[in-house]
Image (cartoon, rainbow, N blue to C red):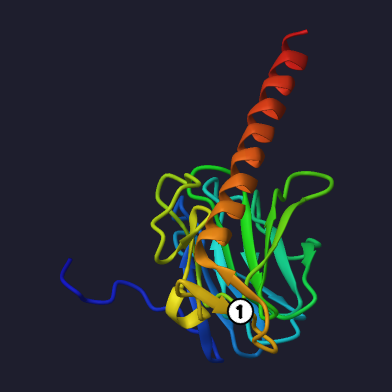
């Protein structure tokens, strides 16, 4: 409240992204070197994960604070932050055909959206054996993904696509937008909204049915 630094966390390289986990346990930086660095401020513990192809510019925690999604190459890396944290663990690798340029977990559910520089947006359920749930081709690469506060699939027509925000101006999406390459394919913003809404509606139904089936098996 007094705008005076309470604690200093040093790192010997350029920081590209910074995020807190929802439970405030983890402070995470995506770095230029390229790597991901984690602090547990209350315990003065630091962890480090390296081996990325490129600078790590995008980070996102799921609402449980268990899963940390990171960019840093042609795959989104998903780290398990339970217990002592992800250092030394193998991450789940979610592949794209082009460098990942955005990641975003839902606010209250478990879906992860990832975007790549070829205009592809993919939806994942990290806890599933086959995590890929849907793929949508956008006219151009998204510059940012952010779910609406209630994770619902309807959205304003100017900037929201299927429940998450993809910057309309930066991505080249107005009323009609040419494809990212060649400029010959035209897709309207309305068609993208409709496609994403239908996908998300079906995915939400699948999640509800899966939870119901799991509860029934538990009671048997």
Residue 23 spot, x, y in % from top left: 46, 50
- Residue 51 in view here: yes
Q: Residues within 10 Å of mark 1 (few under 14, many from 20)?
A: many
Nearest the eye: 93 or 199: 199
Report the number of numbered marks. Answer: 1
* Figure check: 203 above or below 46: above
Nearest the eye: 127 or 193: 193
> Looking at the figure, which quarter contains the C terminus?
top right
> Looking at the figure, which quarter contains the N terminus?
bottom left
Q: Residue at x 62, y 80 (%)?
A: 56
Nearest the eye: 176 or 54: 176
Q: Residue at x 76, y 77 (%)?
A: 74
* Figure check: 65 above or below 103: above
- Residue 44 in view here: no
Kindly state the secondary structure of the residue where label 1 is placed: loop
Q: Residue at x 29, y 72 (%)?
A: 6
Residue 129 spot, x, y in % from top left: 84, 45
Q: Residue furthest left?
A: 2
Q: Residue furthest top?
A: 220
Residue 214 spot, x, y in % from top left: 73, 23
Q: Identify the image quadrant of residue 185.
A: bottom right
Q: Taking 164 as reference, is 35 left or right? A: right
Q: Residue at x 59, y 53 (%)?
A: 196
Q: Identify the image quadrant of residue 67.
A: bottom right
Residue 112 spot, x, y in % from top left: 62, 55
Residue bearing the label numbered 1 = 140
* Figure check: 35 above or below 201: below
* Figure check: 164 above or below 144: above
Nearest the eye: 34 or 123: 123
């Amino acid at each position: 409240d007094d705008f005076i630094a309470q604690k200093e966390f040093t790192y010997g390289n350029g920081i590209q992204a910074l995020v807190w986990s929802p439970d405030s346990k983890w402070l995470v930086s995506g770095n230029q070197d390229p790597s991901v660095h984690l602090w547990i401020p209350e315990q003065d513990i630091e962890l480090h994960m390296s081996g990325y192809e490129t600078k790590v510019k995008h980070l996102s925690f799921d609402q449980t604070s268990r899963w940390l999604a990171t960019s840093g190459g042609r795959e989104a890396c998903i780290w398990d932050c339970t217990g002592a944290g992800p250092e030394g663990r193998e991450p789940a690798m979610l592949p794209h055909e082009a460098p990942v340029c955005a990641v975003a977990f839902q606010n209250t559910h478990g879906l992860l959206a990832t975007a790549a520089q070829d205009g592809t947006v993919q939806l994942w359920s990290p806890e599933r054996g086959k995590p890929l749930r849907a793929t949508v081709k956008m006219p151009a690469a998204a510059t940012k993904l952010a779910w609406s506060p209630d994770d619902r699939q309807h959205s304003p027509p100017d900037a929201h696509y299927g429940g998450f925000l993809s910057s309309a101006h930066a991505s080249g999406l107005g009323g009609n937008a040419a494809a990212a390459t060649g400029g010959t394919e035209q897709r309207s913003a309305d068609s993208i909204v409709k496609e994403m809404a239908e996908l998300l509606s079906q995915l939400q139904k699948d999640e509800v049915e899966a939870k119901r089936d799991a509860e029934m098996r538990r009671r048997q």
